[in-house]
Image (spheres, rainbow, N blue to C red):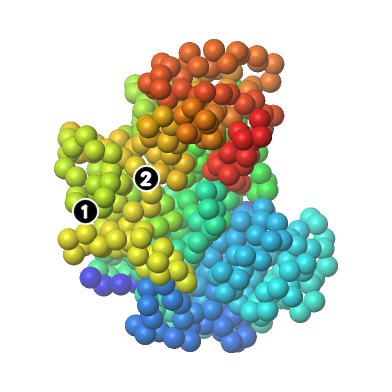
Amino acid sequence: MREFTVGAVHEAIAATRPDQECLVFRDRRLTWEEVTERTRRLADFLSRVGLGCATERASLSSHESGQDHLAIYLHNGNEYLECMLGAFKARVAPFNVNYRYVAGELTYLLRDSRATAIVYHSTFAPVLQSIRDEVPDLQVLLQVPDDSEHDLLPGARWYEDALATGDRTTEPEASPDDLYILYTGGTTGMPKGVMWRQSDALVECFGASRTSESIEEFVAAATGRRALIAPPFMHGAGHWVSFGTWNTGGTVFVPSIPERLDPRDIWSIVERERIDFLLIVGDAFARPLIDELNKNCYDLSSLNVLLSGGAALSAHLKEELLSIAPHLMIIDGLGSSEAGGQLAHVSAAGGASTGTFPLAPNNHILSEDLTRVLVAGDPEVGWLAKSGRLALGYLGDPDKTARTYPIVDGVRYVVPGDRAVLLEGNIVELRGRDSVTINSGGEKIFAEEVEMAIKPHPAVFDCVVTGRPSDRWGHEVVAVVQLRPGTHPSDQDLLDEAAKHVARYKLPKAIVRVEAIVRSPAGKADYRWAKQVAIES
């Protein structure tokens, strides 16, 4: 099997469509040739300041890196994707930074990642400056101006000035072994850097063909799409679909308001730019987007595919979307930082469901004790796993790497932590993340399952389910609920709705009302926050 780099594929496609639009953000409409030149300039700059690969992959263990690492501490914009692609071309490993992190969390991430370079928006300059003395490995700082108008930090360079010093004619000399690092969200534990070989990430994360044996085959398959990426690029799904769009020869569109989800902005871009592919993250994005469609009319005739990745999209919200735009194909994409893309489920007019997926090649259900692969119809609740091209492991953590990437009967698998059952007909029924499972009264209750049971109530805007200590049950199920303004359902009303969808023993023992559910910018629930709210209520 031939192997390729992200940069080589992008440049080959660019050569066939140099004047077509590649990346659009606000008034910047960058062509494929312009993106090629700008990322070459960045790669040349990074190389000139001494960053790159010091130790080749063959000399390293699976949890080690021999490259410099570039932290991308940005809101969405053209600079984010340019930094990823430019770093790949320079043999520097890029990684994502959660821009909501406070000083202590940012310090942990930059130390854990051993970052030697960082690109950041000016609005984050004060936080970065406050920890400079605690991250001495950080050598190269590139600052991107924004509305905050903060001054350039001491020792930093403006991003565009750095690009201006780079050579646009220098062709990249990267290796398929070079790293792409994706940090986990840290909503249930400390963030960890998942290390992928670039060639493996190209296929398993960035959607490139698994069968192409030449660059020419990649180019021939590039038919193009116009994709709008609603979630932050710091979330894996955001930049995965962006690079996946480029690997089809398409155009990536970035929302004009990247700091938050603005439904009017999203739908206006879909209408104006004739977007045919929209990425969102589950209910947290779908609910406000649907509410905007119910208030104002937009031309969605160009939109063919709505993909939800990173969090579940409830069946009742799919039905609402399909009632407004019956021509839509709604796809649930299931994957993880550790496994890349795994499973997909399609809903269209006439039927919408959530939580089940056809089994895809190289995906499996392993037994709970990780000793065997389960067959269709086995009632055991096992682990969703994947084989084939996998990530190397966690940066600097051999023990966690061994636990997450077990070897069963001589085959290496990844087990990201999702529990599932393999039904007859090779249908995967997803139960939920083991890390947020609640052990109550001797039963395992999956938080996501209970959330999906409560959310169909018309008064519920959002819901997160967690557990808290209980003298009677060991732990009891608690629903943290955000209601729609002006609604006042009783606890019993919400429990009656939930009882339509799950067994009674899974129903919450308590319901806590909050003004707003705390989620990551990518729409993922913050279960540590929810647990604290439940304990304190």
Residue depicted at x 34% and y 23%: 351
Q: Earlier in the sequence, mark 2 or mark 1?
A: 1
Going by the numbered disc 2, the residue's amino acid type is: Asp
Q: Is residue 29 above or below residue 156?
A: above
Instruction: Report which residue position mark 1 lands on.
Output: 371
Between 415 and 246, the residue placed more toward the observer is: 415
Residue 30 location (% of width, % of height): 58, 61
Secondary structure under the numbered disc 2 in the rendered image: strand
- Would you identify the image quadrant in which residue 249 lies? bottom left
Instruction: Report which residue position mark 2 lands on.
Output: 418
Residue 141 location (% of width, % of height): 69, 74
Farthest-out residue, front: 471
Crowding around mark 2 (Cα neighbors within 10 Å: few <14, some 14 to 19, many 20+) is: some
Q: Nearer the viewer, mark 2 or mark 1?
A: 1
Residue 12 location (% of width, % of height): 40, 70
Residue depicted at x 36% and y 59%: 404
Q: Is residue 248 above or below residue 514?
A: below
Quadrant where the N terminus sits is bottom left
Q: Is residue 179 visible?
A: yes
Between 81 and 478, the residue placed more toward the observer is: 478
Q: Is residue 200 left or right of residue 286?
A: left
Between 114 and 505, the residue placed more toward the observer is: 505
Q: Is residue 85 left or right of residue 101?
A: left
Residue depicted at x 64% and y 25%: 513
Q: Is residue 459 left or right of residue 210?
A: right
Q: Is residue 507 left or right of residue 145?
A: left
Q: Is residue 417 above or below residue 311?
A: below
